[in-house]
Image (cartoon, rainbow, N blue to C red):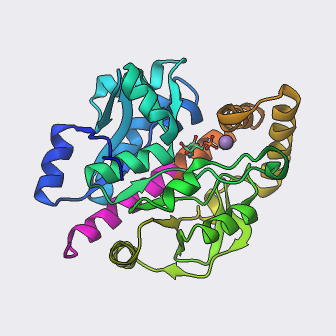
Amino acid sequence: MPPAPVPVLSSEVADALTAGRPVVALESTLLAHGLPRPDNRAAADEVEAAVRAGGAVPATIAVLDGVPHVGLTAEQVDRVCADPDLAKLAVRDLPVALALGRSGATTVSSTALLAAAAGIGVFATGGLGGVHREAADTFDESADLTTLSRTPLLVVCAGVKSILDVPATLERLESLSVTVVGYRTTTFPGFYVADSGSTVDWAVSSPEEAAAVLAARRGLAPGGVVLANPLPDDEQLDPELHDRVIADALAAAARAGVRGKAVTPFVLDHLHRVSEGATLAVNVRLVLRNAELAGRIAAALALLPR
Ligand code: PSU
Ligand code: MN
């Protein structure tokens, strides 16, 4: 195995990790490419505060001038949220950004890689990438899935983004031997909506149980755990509105001929606009819930023997 990149830790994150205190990794692509400017800046602070409310230190991850940072200063978060030309870096893009001194936001895949390299076991996001609905023709499947098959950490999410083919994504997660568990439910959430229409085999009922599953996975096989945390029914996007705006956004992406890593940001942006901010509010809400739960799980993990 080639050596993992050595990220630069903020002093708060470094101190917490050295002392064995709980830390939660946070990604920056959802800030830079998933939420509109300038609302993304306030959301960044709220997500970090939610991790702290759960009992852990937040470690937002991004690459700045070729340096992978784990734990950002306020000025560094400003940069991530303000730059309209910031690159979107999946794992395969990291070497180029590091070698050429470039900056970029990290996706689930690259955040997971850098978090694990730093020794962080728990990560919170909104919704995973996955298999796109036209994947049989386009082969568009997020690198999030293969990365989670070999990265030893637990990611708290509201399922996979509902712009995707959810059943196909669950099939791929099974093939890749990624452990998938629901939080207090076997209903697999649909990101903006509580129920994707798919189910999972297992549920955990507490942060302690979630931490125990990650600890067991670490002792057994490389690769990670997806913990799916649905929004409560009364906080979800109206399912009828959801289906309508998703169809509209996917049709717009097809008309515009959007391809590759531009697809997800394009569709999310379209949704925020056609729903007049309804998808945006729900997206922020679910990320905050995931961040707080991740904080609790990291706190439980810190009490287990390593
Ligand atoms: N969760 C959100 N909003 C986002 C993402 C997750 O609430 O924008 C990002 C994550 O960074 C994820 C990426 O890795 O979307 C997936 O992009 P792609 O489909 O190109 O792999
Ligand atoms: Mn893709």
Q: How many marks?
A: 0
Name the outermost residue toward the front: 1
Position above or below: 199 against 48: below
Q: Nearer the viewer, residue 230 or 9?
A: 9
Residue drawn where x is 50% and y is 58% of the image = 148
Give the magenta-colored segment's residue range. Answer: 287-306
Q: Residue, x 22% and y 67% (percent of image)?
A: 302
Please provide percent x and percent y for residue 199: 68, 75
176 within the magenta span:
no
Would you place residue 14 above or below residue 77 in this image?
below
Placement of 213 over or under 285, stated as above or below: below
Q: Is any atom of residue 90 visible in this view?
A: no
Which image quadrant: the C terminus?
bottom left
Asked if residue 172 lies left or right of residue 205, the reply is: right
Q: Is residue 19 visible?
A: yes
Residue 251 placement, left or right of 29: right
Q: Specify the principal SS of the magenta part.
A: helix
Q: Position of residue 7 (x, y in %)?
A: 27, 39
* Quadrant hosting ligand 2: top right
At x 58%, y 48%, the residue is: 143
Between 166 and 77, the one nearer to me in the picture: 166
Q: Residue at x 45, y 65 (%)?
A: 224
The answer to whether residue 305 is magenta is: yes
| Location of residue 263 in the rendering, given as x and y in whole percent from the top left corner | 71, 35
Near-viewer residue (71 or 246) = 71
Tell me the quarter of the picture where residue 170 sits: bottom right
